[in-house]
Amino acid sequence: MSSGVGMTESRDVSIRVPVLARVEGEGALHIDVRQGRIEDLKFKIFEPPRLFEKFLEGRSVHELPDTVARICGICPVAYQMSAVHAIEQIFGCDPGSWVRRMRRLIYCGEWLESHALHVHLLALPDYFGCASVVELAKLQPEAARRGLRLQGIGNKLIRMLGGRSVHPVGVRIGGFYKAPDDAQVEVVLRDVRELIPQATDLVHWLAEINLAARAPAQSFTSVALRHADEYPLNEGRLVSDRGLDIAISEFDRHFVEHQVPHSTALHCLLHDEPYLVGPLARLNLNHDRLPASVLSQITGVPLALPSTNMFDSALARAVEMLFCLHEAESILCNYQRPDRPYVDYQVQPGVGYGCSEAPRGTLWHRYEVDADGRVLSARLVPPTSQNQARIEADLRTSLQDIGLDQADEVLRLHAETVVRNYDPCISCSTHFLDLRVRRD
Amino acid sequence: MATTFKAVNGKPTVAIHKFSSCDGCQLAFLNLGEPLLQLAELVELVHFPEAGPVAEEAQVDIAFVEGSISTQAEYARIRRVRENSRYLITIGACATSGGLQALRNHRDSADWLAGVYARPEYLDSLATATPIAEHVRVDLELWGCPINGQQVIAAVRSLLFGVTPVVNHDALCLDCKRNGNVCVMVTKGEPCMGPVTGTGCGALCPQMGRACYACYGPAENPNTASFSQRLQGLGLMPQQISDRFMFINNNAPGFTQAAKDVVGGGDD
């Protein structure tokens, strides 16, 4: 698929990439360029729908944490967190401060695992001209191994509270099935402390690579949870940098999901406009909530916040990884084993909302439950369905910015890089990526 | 339709294919850490889109297949994967038994699609989500939701030595006893699925003080009839017992039948 010399902007070409690599799940890209103009552009998601919302109906709420985890292998904890918060809201159950801290801890584990996986295994190979982390490990052995170690500590934190890192089994309504013992905590705390300097090095290393120099800033709306005094994980109000400030129960009044023919994930819009969720949006809206321990280690890092340069996303992930390690350290060094790792609750009928910050962004759940604790209806709005419209808008701008007269191979690689930068979690969003650029 | 050995760089070739799934079983590779780099020295990973290499139609020595068959396109693709693979291993509950999404097989899924999607006609979705072995020959099944790294490494190591991998499918109870766990069914009256569930997870749930929910699928020859009786003895209603079987591995024949026997009044 060569593009000859002297091609003008008005050439009509067709590019196909049947499988987009290094994303979670199955998606496709379809771009039509005619006479130098993008005529049609679709970020296609054809991951088969698995209909979770439907088979939750009639099941006991006690099965929810184990069921919703199966929506996503990379962020099962996020699904468990949004679900337990929603159900506890219905039951009027407050699990107390120990459970609250442990939920932040297991969530930090998932952010570390997911961010380190994305930065090193999925995104970074693009910037070093290689196809996989295996190749990256030959070019940048230290950086690749540091990434795998950061991923590893995330998995350890999840395992400590959940038994295993994928579909962990420790989370229940009201708290946890088992509290870790002091010996477990001590081992994990030592590992966390060892990795803090490595996460700091990652932030500075990524700042030096300066991925943001690859593309200009764009205009978009950031959306994330915001908490009164913490960097948001499980709780907060939904806010945007354009004035939105709502309780999570008001989501439906502002955000609307649409089905489009080219995606099995519903597109979600805020006031009819695309918006961004995820690490960069979170950091844009919550950088003032980073603890001093994190801020002191990133002084001098050229990351002006808020940033509307999407290629600051990797750096945002690294800052969040550093935050997670500090948060984990602070929770673990004050750890006290409770008498019981959960609280009792009374099953009650009602409607409840759960909204938490999955590694890839805001994950909103709504459940209606009957008096026997059976799910009557469930609605789940995952981060990737919210980012889809933003990804399409970004692709349009980015491809025009680098010039549609560029060689097909250049356009294709740039488009893939733009998409991967969002860390789309496609299995999650449906409910695969082949790139087709048709120029006719 | 055995293909010839397609060694690349003197190494056996491996592909990892995804069908309808959550991607969690591929993480058994991606979460290996340093051993992932070592694995890449032992075998040539020719197709593993989530990690980078894409060669969907490549002929390989070992194909790992994640996910169940739930669309027309998947139905056609699994046949090509089989033709192109010398040794095919299903990984996880979705590929091996259909997974959680196979719950649709027992209901009217057209209604379900319409319940989630305003325009179901845009979708290529079959009425069922089915295991790989229902469509093509499978050489080895690795159960689990999710499988873990040890399972895949053990399988690859055996195959590299020219030995057929052996999978232990004893009841979870045996592992649980060896680990010295306190039985949650005996001591707490929990409806633990351990007696009818295959081992492989390390008896994680009982270790957490909770009942096993059978994510590793049915054990060899599970005595589901007397197990259901035991659950009744613990005070569970037939629907609750049926739900215990009709969960992660609902489409595994032993579990589907056990659930029918309970709610159907148990005519055998």
Image: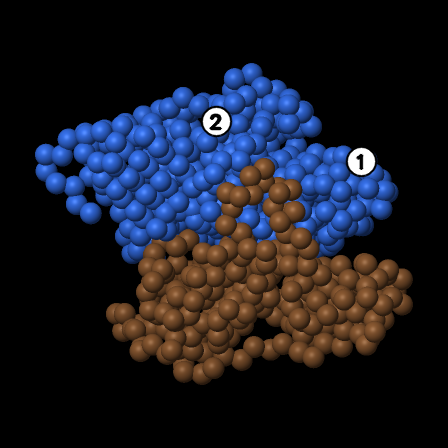
- Mark 2 element type: loop
- Residue B22 can be seen, yes or no: yes
Residue shown at 53% from the left, 35% from the top:
A259
Q: Is residue A167 above or below residue B268?
A: above
* Amino acid on which the number 2 mark rests in the picture: Pro
**For residue B220, what is the image quadrant?**
bottom right
User: Picture quarter containing residue A227?
Assistant: top right
The disc at residue B236 is none
The span from disc 1 to disc 2 (Cα, nearest Å) is 31 Å
Colour displayed for chain B in the image of the structure: brown
Mark 1 on the same chain as mark 2 = yes
Amino acid type assigned to the residue bearing label 1 in the image: Gly
Residue drawn at x 68%, y 59% as measured from the top left: B106
Q: Nearer the viewer, residue B265 or A115?
A: B265
User: Would residue A351 appear left or right of A193 to someone viewing this image?
Assistant: right
Give the letter of the chain under mark 2: A
Q: Residue at x 42, y 28 (%)?
A: A299
Q: Colour of chain A?
A: blue
Identify the element where label 1 is drawn. strand
On the picture, is A234 further left or further right than A403? Answer: right
Relative side of A333 to A396, left or right: right
For disc 1, the marked residue is: A350
Q: Which residue is mark 2?
A: A274
How far from the left and from the top, in percent, is residue A238?
61, 26
In this rendering, the count of numbered labels is 2
The residue carrying pointer 2 sits among few (fewer than 14), some (14 to 19) or many (20 or more) residues within 10 Å by Cα, namely many
Can residue B39 be seen in the rendering of this structure?
no
Residue A92 is situated, as x and y percent measured from the top left of the image, at 81, 35
